[in-house]
Image: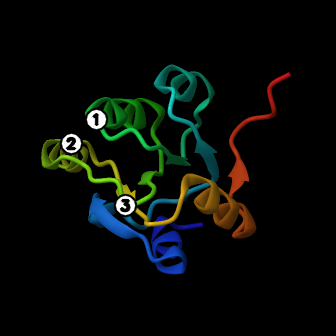
Amino acid sequence: MKVSQMVDALSLKVLAGERFLDREAESGYCCDLLSRVMAKGKKGMAWITVQTHMNIVAVAALVEMACVIIPEGIEVDRKVLDKAEEEGIIVLSSDLTAFELAGKLYQMGITPVCEAVD
């Protein structure tokens, strides 16, 4: 699914990377522990996180994510968004919770990025 379709279907606000909205999101992940995201993340995933510091841009670029979604209307510093633009990272915002976003993305056909952990 194209990120632009996610934006339209979920009324997401584009904070950075608007010119890349034709990128495909193939899977999804909801996690706030950056080391775990780096270990389990996959290229083309939509990442939901409450983290808003500069390191989310670095992780998103490293993993080659489709987009980063910030839930609950959490504000993102302009410097982080400028860096995201520079790196070609799409940053989206929603007033929904991470739980609600994950459920809606799943219903739309975005599959989980990894198996459950024992």
Q: How far apart are marks 3 and 1 (CA)?
A: 15 Å
The residue positioned 69% from the left and 61% from the top of the image is 103
Left/right of residue 108 with respect to residue 32 in the rendered view: right
Depth check, mark 3 against mark 2: the one in front is 3
- Looking at this view, name the residue that lies furthest to the right: 118
The three-letter amino acid code for the residue at tag 1 is His
Q: Determine whether 1 is above or below 69 in the image.
A: below
Q: Where does residue 34 sit, x and y in percent of width and height?
A: 47, 26
Q: Where does residue 83 sit, x and y in percent of width and height?
A: 19, 41
Q: In which quarter of the image is residue 26?
A: bottom right
Query: Which of the numbered marks, if any, corresponds to residue 80?
Result: 2
Whichever of callouts 2 and 1 sits on the residue coming sooner in the sequence is: 1
The crowding category of the residue bearing disc 3, from other C-alpha atoms within 10 Å (few below 14, some 14 to 19, many at least 20), is: some
Query: Which of the numbered marks, if any, corresponds to residue 74?
Result: none
Q: How far apart are marks 3 and 2 (CA)?
A: 16 Å
Query: Which residue was labeled with disc 1?
Result: 53
Query: Which of the numbered marks, if any, corresponds to residue 73?
Result: 3
